[in-house]
Amino acid sequence: MGLVTLAIPFFLLAVLIELALDRWKGWGLYRLNDAIGSLSAGILSRILGLVRVGILMLIYIPLYQWLEPTYQQLGIAWSLDNPWHLVLAVVAYDFCYYWKHRIAHEINIFWAEHLVHHQSEDYNLTTALRQSSDLVPLGWVFYLPLMLVGMPPEVLITAGAIDLIYQFWVHTQKFPKVRWMEWFLVTPSNHRVHHAQNKVYVDRNYGGVLIIWDRLFGTYQEELDEEPCIYGVRKPLNTFDPLAANLQHFRRMWLDAVHTRSWKEKLTLWFRATGYRPADAEAAMPVPSGDLDNFRRFDPQIGRGLRFYALAQHVCYSAATLALLWYGKTLGYGTTALLVLMLTLGLVVNGRILDGERRTRYWELVRLALLLVAVPVLPQITWPAFVGYIGASAGIWWLLVFHRKDDRVSPVSH
């Protein structure tokens, strides 16, 4: 079991502590819909990892094994038991991460993958868990240079996990600027800058653990007292559906490729600078950027009963995800894939409930019916739990949406 999976319960505990402080102190850092949207994106990222092969390891491991005799002749021998080796591995990994992260902000197709992490218009610890699902995995190529120093796969995986786990704590607004830390480490202050869409802050502070790369390569920007951060992206997502979040920029690039008449543009727009659009496609389908002078967060209002229902469903999805991550290896691939599909469908519908989407009144019933049909395929020991969950959910949903007029889903204009 990976370090990141082991860290998930501690991440969730930290989120609950920050949320409790937020409610006690009245900071206003958390909104239910945005927090669930971010956590749902994180869940989708983790569960999809159960049904696909990691491209990096698929390539890295055979290449390392091929080169291993050369490493031995050169006396290169990394060891996880040596703490200095691990420190050096994290530094080397973070250097590669800097360039991966920077390119992700500068090239269209890489931005399409990374965009998910920036869509939240709030900034709290749930934002850290808002991760891309790597529907088109490309970032692995930036870690291949670690083979030049003979880094074994297990050391690479461990260094990557440490780098990712470190980044969790910097996603908070309540840790103050600490001058000496800003020179060396990624901190909440300089990472708030990275998530802001203010012109002065855009495309700055790419480091994962160390901020020294940004200082060396000219991408550092200090958080300014006179320029409060406005979080989110210039072309807002306007939904809490995590699948739509992952498809947002891919969909826009695909439509541009379809609408432009130039074959050169169709083939190259994917690899042009972030935000580039063919002139004829932009004229046909203008997508205005948000007005930062009159910025308003996407915050559709739905009934209290629906909010509690969405929260309860999210808790169920989170518990199911943790169980799947812990015990998934004991299940067959087909069963795992079915559970991943059912969870994905649940996350999508739950996000649309939070959007105030009218059609979810029927989508949720269809989702529960499909899950009921799938129950016989699942391990028999889980049947009572699934049937009880389906019955309770269907009954509560019927009362909320078809019986109580005040809690019916109402459409929201985007």
Image: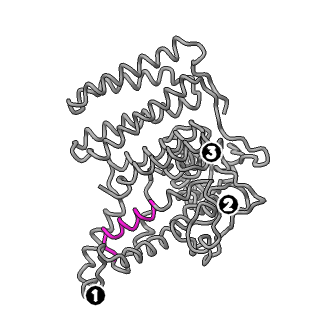
Identify the residue under disc 1: 75
Taking the image as shown, residue 2 lies to the left or right of residue 188, namely left
Q: Position of residue 91 (x, y in %)?
A: 46, 74
SS for tag 1?
Answer: loop
Which residue is more in the foreground, 75 or 285? 75
The amino acid marked with disc number 1 is Gly
Judged from this view, the residue extending furthest toward the front is 24
Which residue is more in the foreground, 359 or 27? 27
Residue occupying the point 65% across, 57% down: 276
Counting other residues with Cα less than 10 Å from the Cα at mark 3, is it few (<14), some (14-19), or many (20 or more)?
Answer: some
Identify the residue under disc 3: 29
Q: Position of residue 264 (x, y in %)?
A: 58, 59
Taking the image as shown, residue 168 lies to the left or right of residue 216, namely left
Q: Position of residue 399 (x, y in %)?
A: 48, 14
Q: Is residue 87 above or below residue 273?
A: below
- The answer to whether residue 213 is magenta is no
The amino acid marked with disc number 2 is Val
Residue occupying the point 63% across, 64% down: 190
Task: Write the start and end of the magenta stretch as one range.
Answer: 151-165
Counting other residues with Cα less than 10 Å from the Cα at mark 2, is it few (<14), some (14-19), or many (20 or more)?
Answer: some
Predominant secondary structure, magenta span: helix
The amino acid marked with disc number 3 is Leu
